[in-house]
């Protein structure tokens, strides 16, 4: 059972364009009858509605077929509580969001720039129960602020995700985006080809997220993952990636949608594939216990020894990418993906940003790109990932956007 | 519903509307000859939208009772008041005649009346035929259906009730060799083609008649040659044309994008307002309409969520870009009447400008003629990968399968075909479009827009078409 109170204030051209408060819920019931399974979902918490959903799930199970490999429901296991709820966020209303948007517009406006983005406040409750004793509950709050600052010549991006609404520094986010926008002018049209790149965490997150998707046990068991074995060197030894639900660097959670505790799982240990993310079904196939990964993840990549600024200072020539846009797989088993750069792409020469470049399209294998990676000391929360900036030795750009 | 309108009025709203309704979905998924997932979902809710002192406010809830309606209407006004100091432009609404109306997309055969057991049996048989045709590793089947009802009431006097019933279906074969994994689907990938039709659509699809080919082609792809790289002609079959229209035209002509209102999320549009009426979007044979009136097409309706009647609009005529998609609010800024595209993903979501059925009108070729008159090119079928920049200009697509054409004949199957270009150059290179007998509307059930994102069903009418001198075979293979 999920309940969701979400308020969002969208802004564009430095004014509010949409402002909304949405209250909703989702109740999902899974019924096992013999060896048959059925599901049903509703969005009302009224008892008659929930009764109807349960009956429908039961009817769907009756209409299903015996599953010879049916996995029993997972039983209760001890859960470690996490701190994921802040009163300040739960109590923040339309005025809070409007005030933060006003700060962004003010900072951008002082430089003559326009701003666009969204400030969203989330209050969710998750409860999982089953007929063999699982009982789990967690309330979670967080705030997102995204910010694209635009001049007539280019744009810059920044965002922030915080659990505690009082810790959101909208002016800092706007300042970061405005700084990039200031630099993003008179863009050079670089020829497509292979370049060294420095990826800001916003961009690096796409690669880490794609890498982690191959570690879902079910995809691995079915041969759909790029991963062929555990214990195999797949990326740079500088890179360690793990999932740890309770880690407060991300948005913490103590259990998954089966009510199973979230274990820390190291996916990549110094460049070597190390562990898989299991739900109860994929775990049962290997006689293991679920790692608590039916649903969400809280992924983290390890930090490097130098600051992001020192990464740039130590680079002879590279393209600095703020973020990517519309990234899609081209060949999942070969980890080839494509996407565009956006909101601040720059040329680094002789240890400093020398000028802006036009947006470029990349088409690249994630594993090949991460074969050589230097990481920054600073990490930031990007969506549901905690990632550093990264310098990659080779990255293939296949087209230019023309803007 | 009157309670919401009255509450908002009393709180000083200049305009208010309420949408209330519910949706029911059913999904049956099979995999490797077993039921993978049978689910039914029900969603109900309502949303209240108000305009007060030129600022919009919206609030919604899943609990449609008097107390909650009053709370939500008051919240919507409070939200508008909180925004007031941050609104520079006076929002107004283009005029529309208030109507009291009913509209229905009625199925011939209600898909919810077809037994789940029969649906499983159909998918199992399709899976059996795919496996029989070739040693494929994974087979999958999907059947989905939905029913939606919604009522719109506004302070201008509109009261519109609409009912929608629709279906979707797909079968998938995944083949694995020592070195490769390849997938073939029918009729399209992932969530399946979508229509506002009943079970008769699934019958007409002939899943069983296509299963053998899908299984065989998935297997053949694992040993097919890699698609060549270079500048070649590209012939896109209908379903890939649908994605091409969707990404490089449909989103580009949304007026809210063109004026920067989506800049903070999915981006803007290279089709800026100054290009309207003068810009050569494509070659003279390119005619694109946005038509919400096509019976049975996924992007059709009676009225949009502004209460504006469904329309057929010339978007591109003889290659020239003529019209944006608009809402009442956006149309007012153009001094026009709305062309009726303001839609929300549910009654609990705020409406946005969305595509209806954005269609490339048929030409006068046949696919055979297009192939026969191609010197060197690649025929491509069914989207596998799609990406476009934040101005809907530079794109790259990949398809499941390709066939190399030399001197007017299909020479060989090729795998991992990709092509890239920019929208105006690409559309201006279009020199052949197949005729009406090879034209159909393809449904895309999950078009995403907004932040937080809203997924909605849209349609794209298309027949196979040829584009000259396109960069194909992108990347290192």
Image (cartoon, rainbow, N blue to C red):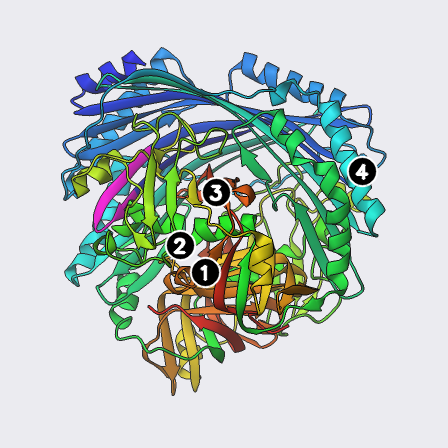
Q: Is mark 2 on a helix, strand or loop?
A: loop
Q: Is residue A300 magenta?
A: no
Q: What element carries label 4?
A: loop
Give the CA distance from mark 1 to mark 3. 18 Å
- Give neighbour class at mark 2: few <14, some 14-19, many 20+ (Cα, 10 Å): many
Give the labeled residue for mark 2: B285
Give the CA distance from mark 1 to mark 2. 7 Å
Q: Is mark 3 on a helix, strand or loop?
A: strand
Q: Which chain carries label 1?
A: B
Residue at screen point 77% across, 64% down: B223
Occupied quadrant, residue B188? top right
Q: Is residue A128 left or right of residue B115?
A: left
Give the labeled residue for mark 3: B461
Eye-nearest disc, 1 or 4:
1
Give the CA distance from mark 3 to mark 2. 15 Å
Give the CA distance from mark 1 to mark 4. 44 Å
Image quadrant holding the C terminus of chain A, namely bottom left
Range drawn in magenta: A10-20
Eye-nearest disc, 2 or 4:
2
Give the labeled residue for mark 1: B431
Give the labeled residue for mark 4: B33
Is residue A181 depicted above or below A318 in this figure? above
List x then y, in percent, for residue B7: 24, 16
List x then y, in percent, for residue B273: 23, 52
Q: Mark 3 lies on which chain?
A: B
Q: Are the residues under badges 1 and 4 in a single subunit?
A: yes
Q: Are the residues under badges 1 and 2 in a single subunit?
A: yes
List x then y, in percent, for residue A112: 16, 61
Query: Which of the pair B426/B219 is nearer the observer?
Result: B426
Q: Is residue A14 magenta?
A: yes
């Amino acid at each position: 059972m999920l309940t969701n109170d979400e308020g969002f204030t969208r802004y564009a051209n430095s004014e509010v364009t949409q402002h909304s408060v949405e209250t909703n819920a989702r109740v999902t019931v899974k019924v096992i009858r013999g060896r048959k399974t059925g599901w049903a979902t509703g969005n009302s918490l009224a008892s008659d509605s929930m009764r109807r959903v349960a009956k429908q799930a039961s009817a769907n199970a009756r209409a299903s077929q015996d599953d010879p490999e049916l996995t029993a429901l997972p039983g209760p296991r001890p859960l470690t509580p996490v701190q994921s709820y802040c009163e300040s966020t739960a109590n923040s209303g339309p005025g809070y969001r409007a005030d933060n948007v006003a700060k962004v517009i003010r900072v951008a406006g002082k430089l003559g720039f326009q701003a666009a983005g969204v400030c969203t406040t989330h209050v969710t409750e998750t409860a999982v129960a089953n007929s063999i004793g699982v009982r789990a509950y967690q309330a979670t709050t967080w705030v997102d602020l995204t910010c694209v600052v635009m001049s007539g010549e280019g744009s810059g991006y920044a965002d922030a995700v915080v659990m505690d609404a009082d810790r959101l520094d909208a002016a800092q986010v706007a300042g970061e985006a405005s700084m990039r926008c200031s630099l993003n002018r008179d863009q050079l049209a670089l020829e497509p080809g292979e370049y060294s790149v420095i990826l800001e965490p916003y961009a690096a997150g796409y690669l880490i997220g794609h890498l982690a998707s191959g570690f879902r046990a079910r995809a691995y068991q079915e041969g759909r993952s790029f991963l062929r074995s555990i214990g195999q060197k797949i990326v740079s030894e500088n890179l360690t990636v793990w999932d740890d639900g309770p880690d407060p660097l991300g948005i913490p959670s103590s259990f998954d949608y089966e009510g199973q505790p979230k274990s820390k799982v190291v996916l990549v240990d110094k460049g070597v594939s190390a562990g898989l993310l299991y739900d109860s079904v994929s775990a049962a196939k290997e006689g293991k216990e679920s790692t608590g990964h039916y649903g969400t993840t809280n992924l983290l990549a390890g930090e490097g020894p130098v600051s992001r600024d020192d990464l740039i200072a130590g680079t002879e020539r590279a393209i600095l990418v703020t973020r990517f846009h519309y990234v899609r797989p081209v060949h999942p088993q070969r980890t080839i993906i494509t996407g565009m750069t956006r909101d601040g792409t720059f040329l680094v020469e002789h240890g400093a940003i020398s000028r802006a470049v036009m947006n470029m399209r990349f088409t690249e294998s994630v594993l090949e790109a991460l074969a050589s990676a230097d990481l920054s000391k600073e990490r930031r929360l990007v969506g549901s990932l905690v990632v550093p900036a990264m310098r990659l030795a080779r990255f293939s750009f296949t087209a230019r956007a023309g803007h | 519903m009157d309670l919401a309108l009255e509450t908002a009025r009393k709180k000083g709203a200049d305009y208010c509307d309420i949408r209330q309704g519910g949706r029911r979905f059913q999904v049956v998924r099979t995999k490797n000859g077993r039921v993978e997932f049978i689910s039914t979902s029900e969603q109900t809710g309502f949303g209240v939208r108000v305009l007060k002192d030129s600022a919009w406010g919206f609030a919604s809830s899943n609990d449609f009772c008097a107390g909650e309606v009053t709370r939500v209407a008051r919240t919507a006004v409070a939200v508008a008041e909180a925004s007031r100091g941050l609104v520079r432009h006076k929002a107004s609404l283009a005029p529309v005649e208030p109507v009291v109306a009913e509209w229905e997309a009625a199925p011939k055969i209600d898909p919810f009346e077809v037994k789940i057991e029969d649906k499983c049996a159909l998918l199992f048989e399709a899976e059996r035929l795919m496996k029989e045709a070739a040693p494929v590793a994974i087979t999958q089947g999907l059947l989905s259906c939905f029913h939606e009802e919604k009522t719109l009431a506004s302070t201008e006097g509109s009261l519109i009730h609409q009912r929608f019933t629709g279906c979707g279906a797909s079968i998938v074969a995944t083949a694995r060799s020592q070195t490769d994994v390849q997938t073939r689907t029918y009729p399209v990938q992932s969530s399946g083609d979508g229509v506002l039709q009943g079970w008769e659509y699934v019958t007409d699809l002939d899943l069983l008649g296509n299963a053998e080919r899908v299984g065989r082609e998935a297997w053949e792809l694992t040993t097919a040659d890699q698609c060549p790289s270079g500048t070649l002609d590209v012939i896109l079959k209908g379903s890939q044309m649908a994605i091409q229209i969707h990404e490089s035209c449909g989103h580009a002509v949304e007026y809210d994008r063109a004026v920067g209102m989506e800049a903070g999320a999915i981006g803007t549009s290279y089709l800026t307002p100054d290009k309207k009426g003068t810009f050569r979007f494509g070659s003279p044979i390119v005619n694109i309409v946005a038509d919400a009136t096509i019976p049975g097409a996924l992007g059709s309706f009676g009225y949009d969520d502004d209460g504006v009647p469904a329309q057929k609009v010339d978007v591109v005529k003889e290659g020239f870009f003529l019209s944006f998609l608009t809402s009442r609010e956006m149309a007012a800024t153009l001094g026009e009447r709305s062309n009726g595209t303001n839609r929300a993903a549910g009654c609990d979501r705020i409406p946005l400008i969305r595509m209806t059925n954005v269609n490339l009108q048929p030409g006068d070729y046949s696919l055979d003629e297009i192939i026969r008159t191609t010197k060197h090119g690649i025929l491509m079928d069914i989207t596998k990968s799609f990406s476009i920049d934040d101005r809907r200009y530079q794109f790259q697509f990949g398809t499941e399968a390709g066939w190399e054409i030399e001197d007017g004949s299909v020479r060989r199957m090729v795998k991992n075909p990709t092509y890239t270009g920019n929208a105006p150059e690409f559309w201006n290179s279009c020199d052949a479009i197949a005729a009406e007998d090879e034209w159909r509307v393809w449904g895309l059930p999950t078009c995403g827009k907004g932040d937080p994102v809203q997924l909605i069903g849209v349609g794209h009418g298309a027949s196979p078409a040829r584009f000259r001198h396109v960069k194909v075979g992108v990347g290192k293979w």
